[in-house]
Image: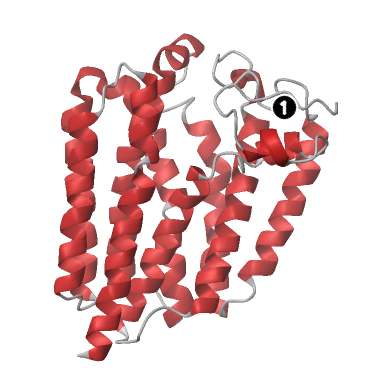
Amino acid sequence: MTQSAGRVADATGNWVDTAAPGWARPYLRLTRLDRPIGWWLLLLPCWWSSALAAVADRAWGPDPWHIVLLLIGAIVMRGAGCTWNDLVDRDIDAKVERTRSRPIPSGQVSAKAAAVFLVAQALIGLLVLIQFNRFAIGVGIASLGVVAIYPFMKRFTHWPQIFLGLAFSWGALMGWAGARGALEWPAILLYAGSIAWVIHYDTIYAHQDREDDALAGLKSTALLFRANTKPMLALFSAASVLLVGAAGIMAHGGYVFALGLIAFAAHLVWQIVRIDIDDPDSCLRMFRSNRDAGLILFAALLLDAAARRAF
């Protein structure tokens, strides 16, 4: 491993570049802590699920300790997932303009050092997981299989976004399991809705690498949909809204939830209208805006839980 503090091409001018110690920068970049959008998108289904359980339980809101644990877990496990992804993809990343400056292909971190770092992050994630009930611990462990196979999927199918959805939406099961010690239909429907949402936003993200992926022999929904991307985004967005809405109905969500769901849907429509799939900057902006869409839905669930408890 070198101690290079070289920057990553698609993430510059952030706090890692300006404030982190030089020796730590390659590892912080490996976990994508210089790009918080990833852990936000992993976290939000966790928070949705925890808040939805509060709606079902007529509680004032989710357990604050669970909210903190889910936050820590999302940050750590997103970092571990990125480290694993970069280990698997290190040869491919070296061929793609946007990713060749990442820590492993650029030589800032060796594969061996990255593997040790991966284990350390996984152990921290385990410490977070065992704070939950036994059922939730089992649900969390079950996610590892999907996480492990995801990086290989773009080699074999045009639908790697489905597998990312399975992994990134797992929190929609975790929050409910942590609160209720079981998996019930509202959580399962929320999980399905979150998967559709992930396919929506990761298709947008994949358009940044569309041409490089084609040259490298990789597959994605961006390459599959191409000119039909906007209609397909509309399809998956509609599926997400309908499935999340069904989850809310089954959990006895009220008018506040319904208004929040409408706002969430409107945000997804805005993304589809505004995006230029041939402009990588536009794709990145619309992709990142999904944090705000997810926070709108989370706020609605929180307010709905409080309103149901109060009235």
Q: Quadrant of residue 242?
A: bottom left
On the rendered image, what quadrant is the N terminus found in? top right
Which one is nearer the viewer's eye here, 165 or 141?
A: 165
Total of numbered circles in the picture? Answer: 1
Residue under the image location 46 percent in, 17 percent down:
213
Residue under the image location 67 percent in, 64 percent down:
126
Which one is nearer the viewer's eye here, 71 or 92?
A: 71
On the rendered image, what quadrant is the C terminus found in? bottom left
Q: Which residue is mark 1?
A: 104
Q: On the picture, is 144 further left or further right than 236? A: right
Q: Quadrant of residue 287?
A: top left
List the single residue furthest toward the right: 2
Q: Amino acid at mark 1?
A: Ile
Residue 138 in sight from this viewpoint: no
Residue 60 in sight from this viewpoint: yes
List the single residue furthest toward the top: 215
Q: How is the image coloured?
A: secondary structure
Image coords of residue 203 (percent x, y): 34, 32
Vertical position of residue 266 compared to residue 14: above or below: below
Image coords of residue 48 (percent x, y): 36, 65
Q: On the picture, is 311 further left or further right than 8? A: left
Residue under the image location 38 percent in, 48 percent down:
291
Q: Quadrant of residue 248?
A: bottom left
